[in-house]
Image: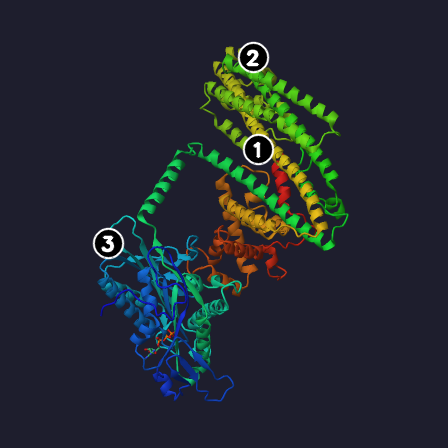
Amino acid sequence: MTIGTPVTPSSKIRRTPACTPGGPKVREENILVTVRMRPLSSRELAAYDLVAWEITDENTIVSKNLYHERHGGTYSFDKVFDPTCSTRKVYEDGARDVALSALNGINATIFAYGQTSSGKTFTMRGVTENAVKDIYEHIKFTREREFLLKFSALEIYNETVVDLLNRESGPLRLLDDPEKGGTIVEKLIEEVIKDDQHLRHLISICEAQRQVGETALNDKSSRSHQIIRLTIESSLREDSGCVKSFLASLNLVDLAGSERATQANTDGTRLKEGSHINRSLLTLTTVIRKLSCGKRSGHIPYRDSKLTRILQTSLGGNARTAIICTMSPALSHVEQSRNTLSFATSAKEVTNTAQVNMIVEKKQLVKKLQEEVARLEAELRSPEPTSAASSCLKSLLREKDFKIQQMEREINELKHQLDLERSSHKEKKSSDNHGPSCQAVKRLSFTTENDSISQKPDSTKPKSRKMGKKSGTSSGMLFTEIRKLETRQRQLGEEANRALELLHKEVSSQRIGSHETAETIAKMLAEIKVMHTGASCTSEVVHMKDKSTTLREEIARLDSQEGNISVLEEKLDSVQRSIEKLVMHFPNSQESTPESKTCSKKRKGGLPFTLSNAANMPNLIRSPCSTSSHKLMEDEIENRAPSKRTPNSEENCSVTNVSAQKQSSSINVKKVQKMFKKAAEENIQSIKAYVTELKERVAKLQYQKHLLVCQVLELEEANEASSEDDAETLTGQSPTPSWIAVFEDQRKEIIMLWHLCHVSIVHRTQFYLLRCLEQHLDDLGNASPALLGDDPACSVSSSIKALKQEREYLAKRVSSKLTAEEREVLYLKWDIPPEGKQKRRQQLVNKLWTDPLNMGHVKESAEVVAKLVGFCESAQPVSREMFQLNFVPLSDKKSWMGWNLISNLLHL
Ligand SMILES: Nc1ncnc2c1ncn2[C@@H]1O[C@H](COP(=O)(O)OP(=O)(O)OP(=O)(O)O)[C@@H](O)[C@H]1O
């Protein structure tokens, strides 16, 4: 038989005719729905079952209403096939046209739907066989085109996707296809088909691999949904340079059948399978029912089952679809058959918008590739992290942390704005309106050196004191913050100064390093002193002007001091370099004793010059005559030469006594010299560590300053906006909805940054749900670096490690915080196989918060984490409002720990 280009019956095509090369024509058409009734089965015959249906014409089926029930009924479809109809006829009238569309670049799906043992597999086998035959006939007679066919097959068994060509690959993940808007099955094998025999062979492999089991209704009941996919690509053989190729896929779907446990007589594994089958079919029915009410009939729950996710484009999307509904004629199954017919009736109303899928012209492709190459080249040219990769990562992490915090701040601001807008609309502008500036002021919780580290807002204070302040008070607070900042800047200068002085002393007293180094240090010392005096003068002048100056002037002034901080940073850099040189000058700098190694290790744990002990810094710089050095020396002498030990240890400290020792023992003189060297070396190391710390603190100061500037500007903008809003409210205009869009966008960005920075998932959940988990965070014992405010420069690896620990912690709570049923549902939903290298609960927790681009996944992860940390302990489900812009006012809650953390981060 010769088969030309498949033709669609004109009755089925409502708009644009068949695909025309030249542009992607969209065609809108309803799903083709046919019904096939099988003969009574031997079981049914043996049970003397009656035929409950009558096919009155090729489109109509009528219930015989043997029991004279009220719900009789007539059903009409594109075709109704009686039990005598051959599968070839079913294929020709109910599937062929749709199936062969795939040869012309239109996606096509054919599936069989019906109760268990109604004949789905029987029908789909025949349809597939016929389709393969016709496809190869078509290829044979379409010589002008070249075809490339690929084959893949999967089954969905107990909500787990398995590759039928490679079962060993285990459960497969579904990914969203951002380009085509559908779903991709990750790692699904696609095999190029050589010929029709090869294709048949592959189909038979899948049949053998599929999950089949015996039930009371069917000896070989399919326990999974099977999808065979043929991808067909074709192009004209002549290479004219601008020829379009077609690309489409044909899905041949054999669904598992709906079943009643009582009828199918299932228990154990079969019962579990049955419940999964029924659940996914229910989702399919819901999707079809909703689509039949029109595409704009609200949310279509494609994502509720793997089946509907995979078939999404075939259900109301870019595909032509044919559904063959199979049914038993038996009276004993009349209810199930009625359900099938009702599903078929809904499916008839579903409209698809299929279009010809063309591959881009070659020239365009070449252009695209060239662009891509250019982009990659540009990327290669841009500076790459080199040997200092880890420090780059650190600074990147810091930058991202900063960005996250900034965004979190902005989100909170937006949320607050929205709350305000809402309340202002409700209360119609009250004179005691809480302006947005309050929020900005509230967030200004920098701590000074003398403040306590955890400056949580005093919840006992009346709310009105915290929230009810007007912008005047806010400005006052900002002034204070600016002053604090300046004081800190001054202190830093002083400390840098002190460090240099010490270094200078050390260099001159020990005569270490070159003369040049000593001179450089002296010069830097002088410069920093000048800079420091300049800064103090400025601050005094400002203090005089205090009352008259405006916030913006303050910030401008603060900005003009930027240079000072940068200079300070540079100076510290060169100090560091000088120290490096000095260290190199120590003759035995490489051969540190085990003891000095221990000392330096100890220092790593905690620098000697923290803020609190900065005043004691000079005491910590050890001179060879200091008690500790002396002790060290004594110990060494005691260990090495006990007999020569001098009773008066004070005498050992002076050079004269050392000379005396020299006379008596040359070994001891060498020892003492060594002591001196070591002490000097350690002093320099201490100063080096201190300078490094100073540098970090200068960086923090910069950061703090930026934050302050942002907040002042924000405060002023907010005040302006607030007055505009007031004016709007008075004129009765509604607030702008762009806040919502901005909020959504920023939230997405934050989620991505959280992911990239390995931020604690509890923190993410906390922020995502915008509810207070402070108590739970305390319980967690700050398991993650994201919860620790005192180490902003923590490394990526430590973040990952902490995140891992956090996941382990959460995994331990799975059993206690989730019911067995909840766990089971989650395991199925999240594709957690019963057997795996890790425990199921760990696997589940490992999957949480892993797909930042998928908002559904983010929402579900937040829900699960919230449950695990006990957030939803009151058995209240996580409300929808939490994920939208309808937040509970924060004033009712404890303050959120996050902002305090920011101030901790800023704590110098
Ligand atoms: N049209 C038909 N003519 C003759 N026999 C049929 C027909 N349809 C189905 N059968 C027979 O009925 C039995 C059940 O069919 P099948 O396994 O295809 O049902 P199913 O709907 O796929 O069931 P399940 O959902 O349990 O997998 C098989 O033995 C099959 O050969």
Instruction: Tell me which residue sits at (50%, 61%) in the image.
Output: 826
Q: Is residue 652 visible?
A: no
Instruction: Tell me which residue sits at (64%, 45%) in the image.
Output: 413
Q: Which circle, 3 or 1, is nearer the viewer?
A: 3
Dot 2 alpha-carbon crowd within 10 angstroms: few under 14, some 14 to 19, many 20 or more: some
Q: Tag 2's secondary structure?
A: helix
Picture layout, residue 868 above or below residue 796: below
Q: Which circle, 2 or 3, is nearer the viewer?
A: 3
Dot 3 alpha-carbon crowd within 10 angstroms: few under 14, some 14 to 19, many 20 or more: few
Point out which mark residue 655 bears.
2
The reply, left or right, for residue 162 in relation to residue 551 is left
Spatial CA distance of label 3 from label 1 is 74 Å
Point out which mark residue 116 bears.
none
Where is mark 1, residue-wise? 606
Q: Earlier in the sequence, mark 2 or mark 1?
A: 1
Q: Tag 3's secondary structure?
A: loop
Picture layout, residue 476 above or below residue 136: above
Spatial CA distance of label 2 from label 3 is 98 Å
Q: Tag 1's secondary structure?
A: loop
Q: Earlier in the sequence, mark 3 or mark 1?
A: 3
Q: Amino acid at mark 1?
A: Gly
291 and 678: which is toward the camera: 291
Where is mark 3, residue-wise? 237
Dot 1 alpha-carbon crowd within 10 angstroms: few under 14, some 14 to 19, many 20 or more: few
Quadrant hosting residue 699: top right
Quadrant hosting residue 376: top left
Q: Is residue 177 visible?
A: yes
Give the quadrant of the N terminus.
bottom left
181 and 439: which is toward the camera: 181
Q: What percent of the width, then of the height, locates residue 545?
A: 74, 26
Q: Amino acid at mark 3?
A: Arg
